[in-house]
Image (spheres, rainbow, N blue to C red):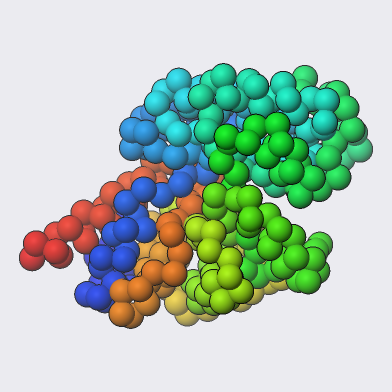
Amino acid sequence: MIRKSTVDASVSPAQRHGLRELLEDPRFEVLPLGRIVDDAVAHLPAGAKVTVTASPTRGADPTVETAEALIRKGFRAVPHLAATQHGEDSLPHTLERLQTAGVQEVFVVGGDAADGQARRGKTTAMRDAPFSDGQKLLAAVRRLAPELRLGVAGYPEGHPKISQETLDESLAQKAEWACCLVTQLCFDPQTVHEWATGLRARGVQTPVYAGVPGSVGSARLMRVAGRIGIGDSLRFLASGRAGLALRLASPGRYDPTSLVAGLVTASGDVVVSGIHLYTFNALEETELWRRRLVAWLEEGDHG
């Protein structure tokens, strides 16, 4: 639940317009598990853009199947394609299947491999050697399906297994082909702002979507934060500002209001093009948070 005191403390009058723009049409990321399609129909706005993650343990099929089902329900589905789950021989079939379903955009990642070769038994799509990295998969998708829009990941806090120099070089190449850059989960809006501003200074004009948590259980967020970046998010999450958001949220649930508001400068400028909500399948709670915040902003506009 969003409490008015949280919103009041987070949003200045000059930030209202920029914040409303960020909240107008967010990207919702879901895991291809359980009744997630039914939950999307029940709780998300009609026609919302819903991205579907790639599971290293379950393979590519659940991602593709969930994307197909979301398309049938009228959503703009964006399946993740992981290099660890696709190869030169199997990729054309996957792309044909997605395009037949009506998918217009995919999100290309390197992906995490399951232990051993377990992933081979988890999907009918994986029959050949996987791509060695996301860059090679991105090039293959662009070659085989040039009409598809391509999204790629950005790392404002770095990557625990990849050097910053390598990240910068790879992103510069990917950005030439990408329709958008979506950042890793990050709890510090200043870090995202500086990273996006730095990209613009280097001539990268690709739209950036800030990856932020939805209204998700705070204990789960703390566990996830320990696995991303180089630890800056953990330090921010423990700081006074983020700690206040945790205390003011519903018991045990994170309130993203301060984080999203922090993406808008005091003068109302917004350096990112939108937000990408990591929902961890908490769709009802996340959309309730968004709608309540939008309603509060609209009330202030007419007040």
Quick one: 67 or 90, which is closer to the camera?
A: 90
Q: Is residue 155 visible?
A: yes
On the picture, is 121 further left or further right than 44? Answer: right
Residue at x 32%, y 47% (from the top left corner) = 288
Quick one: 3 or 298, which is closer to the camera?
A: 298
Horizontal and vertical percent position of residue 89:
83, 25
Number of marks in the rendered image: 0
Horizontal and vertical percent position of residue 109:
70, 47
Q: Quadrant of the C terminus?
A: bottom left
Can you say whether 285 is above or below 223 in the image? above
Quick one: 286 or 222, which is closer to the camera?
A: 286
Residue at x 61%, y 74% (from the top left corner) = 202
On the picture, is 24 further left or further right than 286? Answer: left
Can you say whether 85 is above or below 295 in the image? above
Horizontal and vertical percent position of residue 162:
80, 63
Q: Name the quadrant containing residue 94.
A: top right
Residue at x 68%, y 39% (from the top left corner) = 142
Residue at x 85%, y 36% (from the top left corner) = 130
Can you say whether 123 is above or below 109 in the image? above
